[in-house]
Image: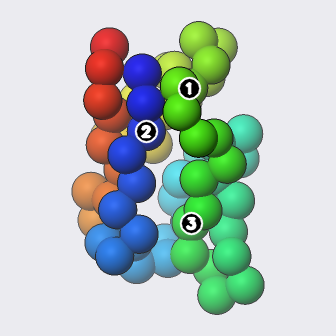
Amino acid sequence: MKLVFNHWACQGHGRCFELAPELFTLDDEGFAVPMIEGDVPAELEDKAREVSQRCPEYAIEINGS
């Protein structure tokens, strides 16, 4: 499973960081920055699905399982 992050769609709500600080950090302006490149570790797949579903701007997608 991979996270696909559309930084142009991100509006800086920070929900991804609040829900999964293991997967996202915030830049100086409060916009999300993915912390994982490549495959999401198996133990974080549920978190990845959750942030994808809860992003109000649909800026996070899941590719793969």
Q: Secondary structure at mark 2?
A: strand
Say which mark, if any, is on residue 10: none
Whether tag 2 and tag 1 are in contact, CB under 8 A, the answer is yes
Alpha-carbon distance for marks 1 and 3? 17 Å
Classify the position of the C terminus by image quarter: top left
Tell me the CA gap for discs 2 and 1.
Answer: 7 Å
Indicate which disc residue 3 carries. Answer: 2
Query: Contact, CB < 8 Å: mark 1 with mark 3?
Result: no
Question: Residue lying farthest front?
Answer: 38
Q: Is residue 41 left or right of residue 59?
A: right
Reading the chain from its start, which is encountered first: label 3 or label 2? 2
Kind of residue sitting beneath label 3: Ala
**Which quadrant of the view contains residue 63?**
top left
Q: From the top left corner, tell me how far across and down residue 5 is, in percent.
A: 40, 54
* Nearest to the observer: residue 4 or residue 59: 4
When the figure is inspected, residue 43 is found, relative to residue 17, above or below; the finding is above
Residue underneath mark 1 = 40
**Residue 57's x, y, as percent?**
28, 65
Residue 12, placed above or below residue 21 = below
- The reply to whether residue 46 is visible in this rendering is yes
Amino acid type assigned to the residue bearing label 1 in the image:
Val
**Image spot of residue 36 (x, y percent):** 63, 41
Residue holding disc 3: 32
Q: Give the residue drawn at x 31%, y 43%.
A: 61
Picture residue at 67% right of the left edge, 48% below the top: 35
The answer, for residue 50, to whether it is visible in the render is no
- Work out how far the residue at label 3 is from the one at label 2, CA to CA, in angstroms: 13 Å
- Crowd band around label 1 with a 10 angstrom C-alpha radius: few (<14), some (14–19), many (20+): some
Give the residue drawn at x 59%, y 53%: 34
